[in-house]
Amino acid sequence: MKECSSERFIISVKVGPKGQITVPVEARRMFDIKVGDTLMVMGDKAHGIALLKSDDFYKMMGDKNGN
């Protein structure tokens, strides 16, 4: 499934044998994800999994230094 707009998208990805996924180019562009960036994986059993750039996560948590 692939549905994209300038502000939203829904794209399916497959989990490989090592448990890896590829972040789709649409997501990398929209969220300015570059090679070497660190992503936070957040999970809630009732609501699912979310990915967030670590810089954005730390800003959201009030730690502008990423510590």
Image (cartoon, grey):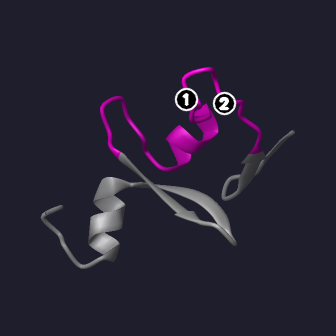
Residue extending farthest to the top is: 17
For disc 1, the marked residue is 20
Instruction: Give the residue type at disc 2.
Output: Val
Give coordinates of residue 39: x percent, y percent. Answer: 39, 47
Q: Main secondary structure of the magenta part?
A: loop
| Residue annotated with mark 2 | 15
Q: Residue at x 62, y 39 (%)?
A: 26
Quadrant hosting residue 17: top right
Q: What's drawn in magenta, residue-wise?
A: 11-38
Residue count near mark 2 (Cα–Cα under 10 Å), binned few <14, some 14–19, many ≥20: few
Q: Residue at x 29, y 57 (%)?
A: 55
Which of the two residues, 30 or 35, is positioned nearer the viewer here? 35
Which quadrant of the view contains residue 52?
bottom left
Crowd rating for badge 1 (residues with CA inside 10 Å; few <14, some 14–19, many 20+): few
**Above-or-below relation of 4 to 45:** above
**Mark 1: which amino acid?**
Gln
Q: Closest to the observer: 42 or 31?
A: 42
